[in-house]
Image: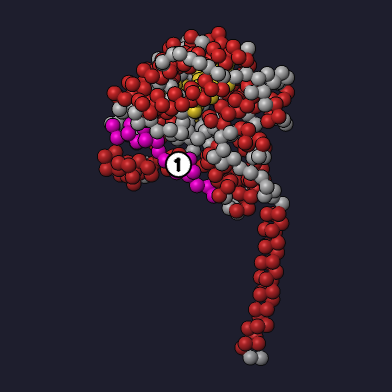
């Protein structure tokens, strides 16, 4: 027998078995992929509730919490990190108060809401703008007021933004006979962009203070008010003027109103988790555990459940990879400027920071005490609470934030902060 014949005889069963294995494996993959509904749509970058519901995008049902907020109080403030679902929440409230029952079919709210009354809604979005001058801020508010004035036929004779705002509220109330709903998205965006430009920041504070003060003087005409933002600036004095304002940012009852719980993740995205498992050679349980370590861990009150970052979750499902999606969107300019001016030893963040509850009420930006801003921005979160001492432990929420933030610090100012040397020592 020649060597070639011997080799062919020896390898033939192996080749045949390998070919069978490849065919079998490919068949399994095709079967697994075919079992997944490829028509399921992830709402990446979509912040309009109406579009999500009409165009069949996946939706994590927050309608029960929304109904509870809307029907147990009237004037609220909510702080959450960027890209955590605040804009979608306000859009959901807008659809609810517009009586859009059709958009809520099949959601939990159907158990509670029976009337579906329609209210006039004034929705002001300050998020997607650049505020580089007082004139720019005035122009943005003026543009929105003109839209409302046209819609409600308000012929205000006032020359001030606050006067026109008050007049359009009164006109909407008179025209509809119902209380007005005020929704303000990212109320603090102008202030964050001018955090270290004190002259311009002072102009902004004066403009916004007068504008938001209308909410107190027009209380009798209002059905519901919700302001959202990243921070709660005490020196705007809007919060001292609005003594009826209910800050629910740390209210455990509403800790899950933005973001995704583990139960919601599994209930809403089981097909996506299965596909993620297949793509990364993991079991279903391993995939959930990996996502939990990477994107979960946000706590907005002492004993609240952990929340997944919705932006990172949706992007990971879409791209089938466990990347640092939230951090890749960029560190906010105001935080970079704060770090430049701070002498705070940032190495303390690695092992966590113990602090009293007072820090959650210190809504002033101080270079030598950046912890409140780190917490409100989502770079730190509550990881422990000692009730007897009323002390909180703040740490990075998850692997995505911790690893990406440490890399950012090393690149940002490694020599000055000595963070590079600190990490090399194994700490």
The residue where tag 1 is placed is 329
Q: Residue at x 62, y 18 (%)?
A: 119
Query: In screen coordinates, is 15 left or right of 202?
Result: right
Query: In screen coordinates, is 357 left or right of 54?
Result: left
- Return the residue nearer the eye: 163 or 294: 163
Can residue 366 be seen? no
Q: Which residues are magenta?
A: 321-341
Q: Quadrant of residue 266?
A: top right
Asked if residue 308 is positioned above or below residue 356 in the image, the reply reads: below
Q: Residue at x 58, y 29 (%)?
A: 91
Can residue 121 be seen? yes
Q: Is residue 244 magenta?
A: no
Asked if residue 42 is positioned above or below residue 4 in the image, the reply reads: above
- Return the residue nearer the eye: 170 or 265: 170
Query: In screen coordinates, is 74 left or right of 408?
Result: right
Q: Is residue 322 magenta?
A: yes
Tell me where residue 315 appears, x and y as whole percent: 54, 44
**Residue placed farthest to the bottom in the image?**
1
Q: Residue at x 65, y 85 (%)?
A: 6
Q: Quadrant of residue 413?
A: top left
Query: In screen coordinates, is 30 left or right of 350?
Result: right
Tell me where residue 173 appears, x and y as whole percent: 58, 13
How is the structure coloured here? secondary structure
Tell me where residue 254 appears, x and y as whole percent: 57, 23
Name the dominant secondary structure of the magenta segment: helix
Tell me where residue 74 appears, x and y as whole percent: 57, 14
Quadrant where the C terminus lies? top left
Q: Quadrant of residue 350?
A: top left
């Amino acid at each position: 027998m020649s060597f070639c014949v011997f080799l062919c005889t020896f390898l033939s069963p192996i080749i045949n078995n390998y070919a069978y294995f490849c065919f079998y494996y490919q068949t399994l993959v095709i079967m697994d992929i075919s079992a997944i509904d490829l028509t399921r749509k992830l709402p990446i970058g979509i912040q309009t509730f109406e579009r999500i519901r009409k165009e069949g995008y996946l939706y994590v049902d927050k309608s029960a919490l929304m109904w509870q907020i809307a029907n147990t109080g009237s004037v609220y403030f909510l702080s959450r990190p960027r890209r955590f679902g605040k804009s979608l929440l306000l859009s959901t409230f807008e659809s609810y108060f517009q009586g859009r029952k059709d958009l809520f079919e099949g959601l939990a709210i159907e158990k509670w809401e029976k009337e579906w009354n329609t209210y006039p809604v004034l929705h002001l979005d300050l998020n997607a703008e650049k505020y580089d001058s007082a004139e720019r801020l005035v122009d943005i508010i003026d543009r929105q007021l003109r839209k409302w004035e046209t819609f409600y036929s308000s012929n205000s004779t006032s020359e001030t933004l606050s006067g026109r705002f008050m007049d359009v509220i009164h006109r909407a109330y008179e025209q509809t006979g119902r209380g007005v709903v005020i929704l303000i998205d990212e109320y603090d965006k102008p202030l964050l962009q001018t955090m270290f430009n004190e002259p311009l920041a002072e102009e902004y504070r004066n403009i916004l203070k007068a504008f938001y003060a209308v909410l107190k003087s027009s209380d009798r005409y209002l059905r519901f008010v919700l302001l959202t933002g990243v921070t709660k600036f005490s020196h705007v004095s809007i919060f001292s003027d609005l003594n009826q304002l209910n800050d629910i940012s740390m209210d455990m009852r509403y800790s899950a109103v933005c973001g995704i719980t583990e139960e919601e993740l599994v209930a809403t995205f089981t097909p996506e988790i299965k596909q993620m498992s297949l793509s990364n050679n993991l079991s279903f349980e391993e995939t959930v555990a990996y996502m939990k370590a990477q994107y979960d861990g946000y706590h907005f009150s002492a004993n609240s459940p952990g929340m997944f970052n919705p932006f990172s979750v949706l992007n990971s499902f879409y791209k089938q990879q466990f990347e640092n999606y939230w951090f890749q969107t960029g560190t906010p300019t105001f935080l970079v400027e704060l770090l430049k001016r701070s002498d705070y030893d940032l190495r303390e963040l690695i092992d966590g920071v113990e602090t009293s509850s007072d820090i959650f009420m210190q809504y002033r930006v101080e270079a030598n005490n950046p912890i409140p801003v780190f917490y409100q921005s989502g770079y730190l979160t509550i990881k422990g609470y000692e009730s007897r001492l009323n002390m909180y432990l703040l740490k990075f929420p998850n692997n995505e934030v911790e690893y990406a933030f440490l890399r950012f610090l090393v690149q940002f100012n490694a020599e000055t902060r000595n963070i590079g040397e600190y990490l090399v020592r194994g700490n």
